[in-house]
Amino acid sequence: MKYLSLSLLILIFFPLLGFSQLSAVDINNEISPSSGNNSLNTLSQSISTRFPIGKNKIAKWSAGVHYKNLLTGNNTSVINNLLLHSIGVSVGYSNKISDKTVMTITAQPQLACDMKQINGDDIRFNASVHFLTRKENGFSIGWGIAYAYQFFGNQIIPIIDIRYRKNIGEWRIGGALPLRPRIEYLFNKNTTVGFKLEGNYYSYRLSPQLNSQYLFYRQWDAGLYVDQRISKKWFFNASGGYAFNRSLQIFDKGQTVPLSFFGNRVAKIYTPSYENKSTGFVFRIGIQLRLFNQE
């Protein structure tokens, strides 16, 4: 199965490298092992691309292609060697609504399942509206809201984005709160180190052979990272940390809720047919192609 994942990455990645308007490519690998009677070991690979599709004096349109897989391992047959995939396309619109404020709207439909028998029940959808205002002395403040149709129901995530950026040799803080806060230090124009907190919520549809149940995966982890420029456009990144809140649950198809904040269900609490809660280390390594300056 890992060779299938690698083949999919290659099929998506190399044709896009030849696209003349490509602006960025990210390739990442994540491994998170744990031990004990309730161990949960995960391996994940992802690739994402971004490219512009139009612009004028105040507005820009962009598009992207995204792929991610999740391979789970456990000492039980329920989730042992279970390989899940998500493939999506995104469209983004950015508009400068004032001298200091930019509004960004994104939308992304996704196919998220085990790919054994694909149908309309395997589609998810994400969308967000975000405003970023540049202040004085290197500060930027952002706010917005993200919506996701997950297989467990409708998910709402409020976003607060605080950024502080100065010259080389300075500390920087930033990231979307509460899911992606980080603090980092620029040693020089090539090397950045920092600390980050990261929260991820995913849902995947299982095959009809498994009664079209859905898998809900949640992971919160914290750790250190390094971002290193290795050439004019290529960057290497690596991180290591600890997953202090990680759970994998499987629910029946009809066990949904009208609304959830982050990944927390409102009003209805269901008992999963399978549940695994564990902690463990998290290691990530990736490479990025940046053809233009990143915001």
Image (cartoon, rainbow, N blue to C red):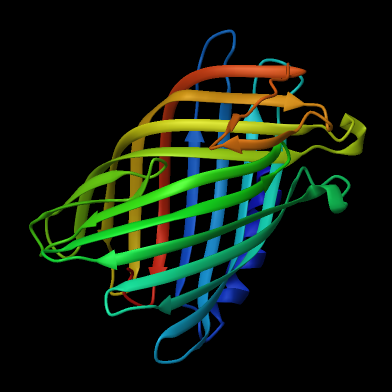
Question: Percent x, y for residue 139?
Answer: 19, 60
Q: Quadrant of residue 58?
A: bottom left
The residue lying at 65 percent from left, 20 percent from top is 74
Asked whether 295 or 148 is in front, the reply is 148
Asked whether 135 or 222 is in front, the reply is 135
Does residue 39 show up? yes
The residue lying at 57 percent from left, 24 percent from top is 247
Residue 253 position (above or below residue 10): above
Left or right of residue 230: residue 50: right
Asked whether 288 or 183 is in front, the reply is 183
The residue lying at 48 percent from left, 52 percent from top is 28
Residue 164 position (above or below residue 277): below
Asked whether 57 or 230 is in front, the reply is 57
Residue 251 position (above or below residue 132): above
Question: Percent x, y for residue 218?
Answer: 56, 31
Left or right of residue 236: residue 255: right
Question: Which image quadrant: the C terminus?
Answer: bottom left
Question: Which image quadrant: the N terminus?
Answer: top right
Q: Quadrant of residue 220?
A: top left
Does residue 3 show up? no
Number of residue marks:
0
Q: Quadrant of residue 207?
A: top right
Seen from this angle, which residue lies furthest bottom?
56
Seen from this angle, which residue lies furthest top?
37
Question: Percent x, y for residue 135?
Answer: 19, 65
Question: Percent x, y for residue 196?
Answer: 31, 40
The residue lying at 52 percent from left, 75 percent from top is 93
Left or right of residue 196: residue 113: right
Seen from this angle, which residue lies furthest left?
169
Residue 135 position (above or below residue 239): below
